[in-house]
Image (cartoon, grey):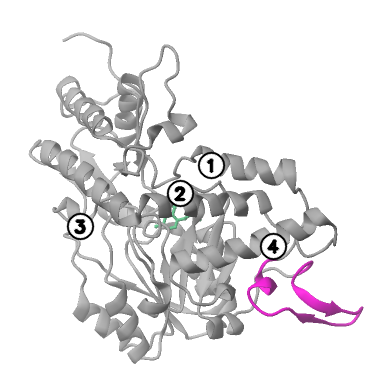
Amino acid sequence: MTAGAARRDFPALRRRPGEPPIAYLDSACMSLVPRSVLAAMRAYYTETPGCAGRSLHRWAEAVGRHVEETREEFARFLGAREPASVVFLRNTTEAINLVGQGIGLARGDAVLISDQEHNSNLVPWQRLARERGIRVDILPLPEDGSFPSDAFEAALGRGVKLVSLFHTSNLDGRTLPLREIVERAHDRGARTLFDGAQSAPHRRVEFDRNGSDFYAISAHKMLGPTGTGVLVGRPDRLRELRPLLIGGETVEWSTLEDHELRAPPHRFEAGLQNYGGILGARAALAYLERTGLEEIEAAQRDLNAIATRELAEEPRVRILGPPDPAARPSIFGFSLAGIDPHDAALFLDAGHGVLVRSGRHCVHSWYERRNLAGSVRASFYLYNHRADVRAFVRGVREMIERIPVGRVTAAGPPPPGP
Ligand SMILES: Cc1ncc(COP(=O)(O)O)c(C=O)c1O
């Protein structure tokens, strides 16, 4: 299957009577689900609606087996030899919190993050600073998308225990050099955690090969159901982590006085799990495998190149991140001089059926330091076609024509007219 040819597999993209065709350009927030994912979730509830690992009846046995098969498939997909490396969680945010709370950080330990992290990879460290007295060191990233190797080396030299960075940025789409980061961090004895929320949907994680200690992903950004995610961790590192939640399913045995935790990954999966979601995520992986991640990324490069070629020369458009769209294939982040980002998003939706994200993209700190109100983000995935990008470009051009610089816009497009 060719990436971009798949629109009909996604029921949300069907044409609604009286509405323009939808150009869904917000997949970095949440991707759409194909029919096969919906069918897999439905099959769980209609065919084998059991809870894994508790009852012994046929439905419970079936769902237990399907969940463990899904774990194996995630491990293969993410390039981890050991299925036990895969912990099912709700999302990237939970995975980062699990590592942060569980890795044993104490007063004086330092965590290194960048100045462009999603709140999910910032706020948990701030709380640990407040409550446990850890140090949070910040690596400033140049705006052109390059990686500041010397500054990174210098930061490591100040005694860092954990490096926790995004792999691909949700703000401007840049990807950090994971291999180099891991090697240098490990040379200095630091552990590594990557926020892979924006990377895993588009490129091979190759977890074992890249050598990172932990990698966090959200399946709902890669065609899976909402509230499904994975932490993949080196087995020895997972054994060192203290679970965030414990209770049912996490213990070998318990008495009124004591308990013994199960081995990873099950000690991290407390309580009844999101079986329907996990099995939906399995179908999502199958869909991505059939399409091919390389094909998906190549198609996005093509779409982003069109948007960049058409809009880079517009004097009021400022594209965020690397100038070369090939260095940020899934994301086209930009600001428009004189136009509020939320107004821009409402204009694109109301007038053109183009759905984008606006605001601070959960990276408030980045905008706050630059005194910016926010930006607009178009993000691409495998169901997007060139027609979507053309609608987006048309919408942006029309907005520029109709909203003069300096005019304070209402929420929505101005009325028709000169
Ligand atoms: C880079 C990045 N990190 C973390 C997250 C948080 O993901 P989730 O909300 O699925 O936990 C997002 C979500 O947009 C993201 O883009």
Q: Which residue is mark 1?
A: 36
Residue 261 spot, x, y in % from top left: 74, 79
| Mark carried by residue 65 | 4
Q: Nearer the viewer, residue 247 or 76?
A: 76
- Cα distance in 3D space between marks 3 and 1: 31 Å
User: Badges 3 and 1: C-beta atoms under 8 Å apart?
Assistant: no
**What's the residue at 42%, 73% (across, down)?**
207
Few, some or many residues within 10 Å of mark 4 (<14, 14–19, 20+):
some
Say which amino acid is labelled 3.
Answer: Ala
Magenta span contains residue 85: no
Magenta region, residue range: 247-269
For badge 4, the amino acid type reads: Arg
The disc placed on residue 287 is: 2
Relative placement, left or right, of 322 versus 59 is left
Task: Residue 327: give its label.
Answer: 3
For numbered disc 4, what is the local secondary structure?
helix
Furthest-top residue in view? Answer: 417
Determine whether the residue tagged by mark 3 lies in a helix, strand or loop.
helix
Dot 1 crowding, Cα within 10 Å, few <14, some 14–19, many 20+: some
| Distance in Å between CA atoms under marks 2 and 3 | 25 Å
| Disc 3 residue crowd, few under 14, some 14–19, many 20+, Cα 10 Å | some
